[in-house]
Image: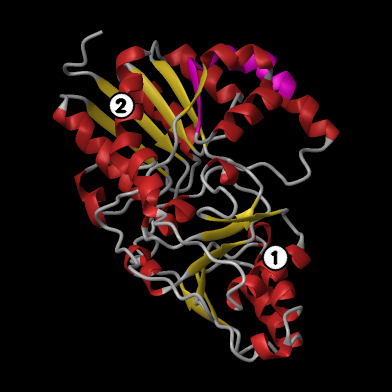
Amino acid sequence: MGLNHNKIAVLCNYELLPERVGGMDNFFWDFDKKCKENNIQVDWFFPNQSDHGYYSQLNINSSKASNVENYFLCFCSKNKPKYTHIITHFLELCTPFFFQVKKKSKAKIIAIDHNPRPLNGYSFKKKINKRVKGILFSRYIDVFVGVSNYTVNEILKDFGFHLKSKSLTIYNGVILDAIQVRKTRAILKPSFLVASHLRESKGIQDLIEAVNLLSVEIKNQIHISIYGDGPYKEELLKKIENYSLQDCFAFLGSKSNLNEIFLQYDYMLQPTHMECFSLSILESLAANVPVITTNVGGNTEVITSSENGYIFDAKDIKSLAKIIEDIYSGNKKISINTRELIVNSFSLPKMVENHFELLKTI
């Protein structure tokens, strides 16, 4: 199928925040540029309007008070656009929305799943509910895309293994040129950072517990910088105060230039309980900063323990404490340049190209 003068819609349940410019923002910008270069017009649908970065160049429709799905359905009823493809990001899969879209449009629907799953899985009731939705509504989605192999497997578990033939993995990617690279790595007393939204599922409370298990000597010296903000911050501060660990942690807020910050540290810590495929892990590795993280989501698809980082079981505080102790005392170390894997497999141009190819093949 030729792509000249096609028109597509991209729906993203993703708030546009100038103070939080991450990997997905860069993907949206570069995907829009790629489409324009190929004479494809993109109508973007976000919860809010913004003109920071390249967003000023995007044709954005803001749902404002309404949710993105309802706004889009009203938009289609009113304007009757002729889209060849409709792409969704961060929307719940297999809902009546997809049936309603198919009633209004002949477009091919591509649903991208970025959503992490709970550590212990869904409740029995929710599993049944998802399987029923899969039976009723999966037929209205032409392609399911997971951001990791883990995600694709979860889509099949959630909605039915009959979807295997129309499900595929497209890994997230990062802008390599923008990420400054650390040249050397301290063997003794290395520095650590956390780059994460501050919510309970990110497991930073486990990190605090792990640091509390360290020897007094290490606790008197170790320093961990935490970048990010979120609703769980006060709980984390209380826990730190209860253990008198105020000198071990510094909360430095959200930063839009983490690509310039990673190289200031030797290791990144990410004790998360749920993940699909972490862009911050990719960015850290691209900066030649190894990652200590959990065995959830797609983490093990990019981190090989003892090669470019360390993997431990989610919520295993003792294992995390032992890894930190061994690294801090020089008993463990990562020697390779962790950037090479990201260059070869997880670059933003590769991610953009793979998503763009779907428009030609679906």
Q: Earlier in the sequence, mark 1 or mark 2?
A: 1
* Three-letter code, disc 1: Leu
Horizontally, residue 63 falls left or right of residue 116, namely left
Stretch in magenta: 131-146
Q: Residues within 10 Å of mark 1 (few under 14, many from 20)?
A: many
Lateral position of residue 142 relative to residue 29, left or right: right
Secondary structure at numbered mark 1: helix
Q: Nearer the viewer, residue 336 or 53?
A: 336
Q: Splitting the image into 4 quarters, where does residue 309 fall? A: bottom right
Q: Residue at x 38, y 74 (%)?
A: 264
* Image coords of residue 90 (percent x, y): 51, 39
Task: Inspect the magenta stretch and tell me whether residue 274 lies in it.
Answer: no
Q: In the picture shown, does residue 233 fall above or below 172?
A: below
**102 left or right, relative to 355:** right
Residue 348 in percent (x, y) is at 32, 42
Q: Provide the residue designation for mark 1.
A: 320
| Percent of width and height locating residue 127 | 78, 29
- Within 10 Å of disc 2 (Cα), the crowding (few <14, some 14-19, many 20+) is some
Q: Main secondary structure of the magenta part?
A: helix
Q: Position of residue 184 (x, y in %)?
A: 37, 71
Instruction: Tell me if residue 46 comes above or below residue 223 in the rendering.
Output: above
Q: Residue at x 41, y 34 (%)?
A: 11
For label 2, the residue is: 356
Instruction: Say which of 132 and 309 sits in front.
Output: 309
The quadrant where residue 159 appears: top right
SS of the residue under disc 2? helix
Q: Residue at x 76, y 86 (%)?
A: 242
